[in-house]
Image (cartoon, rainbow, N blue to C red):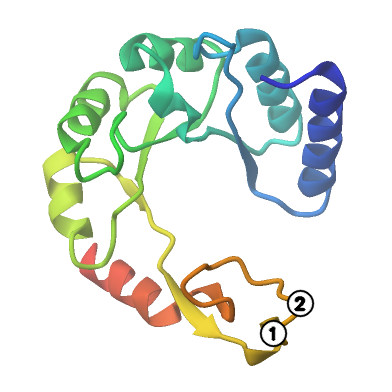
């Protein structure tokens, strides 16, 4: 739930991204009772499609009370893709739901399964669910000793304030290799 000023600011930011080369925008607007906010979602989809780009509803979808009903709503609003873990903590735990969503709705909207998918489990997951595209962060961590001087820190990992996230090129290569 966002107030009108926040929503206007989000639309302006989305325009900036779209005008500067973004392939699409991932977003997720819900009502206070966790249903798809049809009005705001529709506005965003129209904006994104006006640039001939992809509208992707993110994992806010996973906390809606009825995934099938929510997916039908997203389809009716012309959303191109939905990122989901099948309503579970991760896509591996939600694989049965993701498979069912792909079987019933995959010809109408792209199911983009994400959270917990990696090079080791991606092919088995893809073969089981028949999703065409997995989403993976392929992240690892690096240490930057300039993150903290003992008094001031801009790190946010409690176990090591000098850590930061990066996309790991080797993990990306393995994911691609293992899913082909």
Residue at image position (78%, 48%) is 17
Q: CA distance from mark 1 to mark 2?
A: 6 Å
Query: Mark 1 Cα within 10 Å, few/some/many (few <14, many 20+)?
Result: few
Residue at image position (28%, 62%) is 118
Quadrant placement of the C terminus: bottom left
164 or 86: which is nearer to us?
Answer: 164
Q: Is residue 177 above or below residue 44?
A: below
Query: Mark 2 Cα within 10 Å, few/some/many (few <14, many 20+)?
Result: few
Position of residue 117 in the picture relative to residue 155 (left or right): left
Residue at image position (58%, 11%) is 32
Q: At which x and y percent is residue 123?
A: 18, 58
For the residues labelled 1 and 2, say whether their Cβ atoms are less than 8 Å apart.
Answer: yes
94 or 154: which is nearer to us?
Answer: 154
Residue sitting at the far bottom: 145
Q: Secondary structure at mark 1?
A: loop
The label shown at residue 152 is 2
Q: Is residue 17 above or below residue 173?
A: above
Q: Is residue 131 above or below residue 155?
A: above
Residue sitting at the far front: 151
Q: At which x and y percent is residue 59?
A: 46, 34
Residue placed under numbered mark 1 in the picture: 150
Quadrant placement of the N terminus: top right
């Amino acid at each position: 739930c966002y107030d009108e000023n926040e929503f206007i600011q989000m639309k302006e930011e989305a325009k900036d991204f779209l005008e500067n080369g973004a392939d699409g925008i991932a977003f997720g607007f819900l009502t206070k009772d966790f249903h798809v906010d049809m009005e705001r979602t529709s506005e965003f989809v129209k904006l994104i499609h006006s640039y001939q780009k992809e509208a992707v509803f993110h994992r806010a979808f996973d906390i809606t009370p009825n995934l099938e009903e929510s997916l039908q709503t997203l389809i009716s609003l012309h959303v191109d893709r939905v990122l989901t873990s099948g309503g579970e903590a991760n896509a591996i735990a939600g694989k049965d739901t993701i498979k069912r969503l792909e079987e019933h709705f995959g010809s109408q909207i792209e199911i983009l399964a994400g959270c917990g998918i990696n090079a080791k489990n991606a092919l088995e997951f893809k073969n089981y669910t028949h999703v065409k595209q997995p989403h993976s962060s392929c992240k690892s961590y690096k240490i930057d000793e300039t993150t903290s001087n003992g008094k001031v820190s801009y790190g946010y990992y409690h176990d090591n304030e000098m850590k930061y996230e990066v996309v790991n090129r080797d993990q990306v290569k393995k994911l691609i290799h293992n899913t082909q």
